[in-house]
Image (spheres, rainbow, N blue to C red):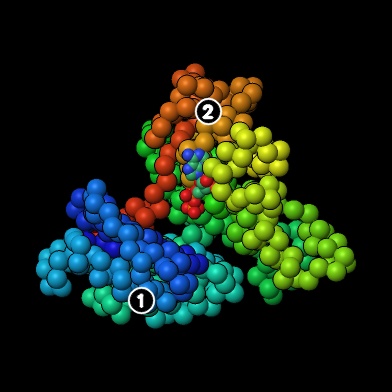
Amino acid sequence: MRILVINCGSSSIKYKLYGVELGDCLAEGIIEGIGAPGARHRHRVGDWETAVEASVTDYRSGVSCIVEALSEWGPVPPVGDSREIVGVGHRVVHGGERFSASVIIDPGVLETIQSLDSLAPLHNPANRAGIEAAGDLLAGAPGVAVFDTAFFSTLPERAFRYAVPAKWWRRHGVRRYGFHGISHRFLVERASRVLGRPRPNLVTFHLGAGASACAVRDGRAVDTSMGMTPLEGLVMGTRSGDIDPAVVFHLMEEGLSAPEIRRGLEREGGLLGLSGISSDFRSLSQATRAGEPAAALAVEVFCHRIRRYLGAFLALAAPCDGVVFSGGIGENSPDVRRRVLEGLDSLGLALDPSRNEGEGERRISTDQSPIAAWVIPTDEEALIARDTVRLVVGGQV
Ligand code: ADP
């Protein structure tokens, strides 16, 4: 029996195939550039990898390519074989107030996800397209929706309400939801194991192209940096994160249109906006080493914002057991972790510089540090697979 995990992004589909019994990832891949000429499909089985140009015009043809690749290059046997795909787990970005846990997808669930399109216009329609395509192409395998917002259903009202007129909340649904919940939940579950605490108090950071922080008490989310949309909070690749809302009125009065401002905040802000060079952290690190002052400033603002949230969330998670770094930047940049954690001994956080330079999952604070700091590589697909098995087969990956 196999479990397929599908993650439809705004222009890509990532997938991983798991064996129910083994827990290992058997095959994985990505299709990038959906709808654009020259879409690329990379497929990997063990150490063997192939990359081909694929004519993928939409999510349906993308999922069809994936199913073909899995049967052509393995390891999915024909329908009827006992090792066929028995469940498909889908990442769904927005579950609104309706979904506080993963669910088996039926027409009612799909309709509710559709009703939330306006809250995640780039993501939920793509997620639905993937669900519908897999439902048609793998008709015997039930789909499971795993929501990025669900982990934040435990936020207390004092954390999810904005201090705006109450009717905006009641009539227009203006509140904070939080995102990256699949990753933060994975980190909390993993941290609980490595720290040996069943319900830890934590501050978790997912630092990738998108970036967010989460404050956790007794294993549950009590606050997060992202808000009604994934624009709030930390500085991201192209997203500004927090700004004074009055900046928007000021720019409108200066003659900028609403779409121009939106583009600036969502696609032309963040590391890209600050540096004018790139949204990619590795490129900015290189540019910084080459002496580009704007790249250096972008990295400084990025780290300063993380440190600010760390201070705030340590207070919410007190007494805090651990701080966790994850995501492409959080896992791979010792420099970012050093800038965020150095000089915090008086708060109970003592970084071990040599552990910080290592690789993979590990403790990076000293053994004496009252609050442990860890790097934990995130694995959202593994968590989606786990929920899918639980709901479809009733077992554990
Ligand atoms: P996504 O949110 O798209 O999944 P990732 O979690 O893969 O993104 O993170 C992408 C970011 O991680 C990019 O800014 C990339 O430059 C950065 N990154 C990847 N590897 C490294 C590295 N070795 N050092 C610093 N940054 C890195």
Viewer can see residue 23: no
Q: Position of residue 45 (x, y in %)?
A: 24, 54
Viewer can see residue 84: yes
Of badges 2 and 1, nearer the viewer stands 1
Q: Quadrant of residue 318?
A: top right
In the displayed structure, 365 sits above or below 384; it is above
Q: Position of residue 39 (x, y in %)?
A: 41, 68
Residue at (68%, 38%) from the top-left corner? 292
Q: Mark 2 vs ligand 1: CB under 8 Å? A: no
Q: Position of residue 170 (x, y in %)?
A: 68, 71
**Residue that label 2 marks:** 371
Q: 323 or 231, which lies in front?
A: 231
Residue at (74%, 68%) from the top-left corner? 260
Nearer-N-terminus badge (2/1): 1
Q: Position of residue 247 (x, y in %)?
A: 81, 58
Q: Residues within 10 Å of mark 2 (few under 14, many from 20)?
A: many
Amino acid type indicated by mark 1? Ser
Q: Secondary structure at mark 1?
A: helix
Amino acid type indicated by mark 2? Ile
Q: Residues within 10 Å of mark 1 (few under 14, many from 20)?
A: some
Q: Which dot marks residue 61?
A: 1
Residue at (61%, 50%) from the top-left corner? 278
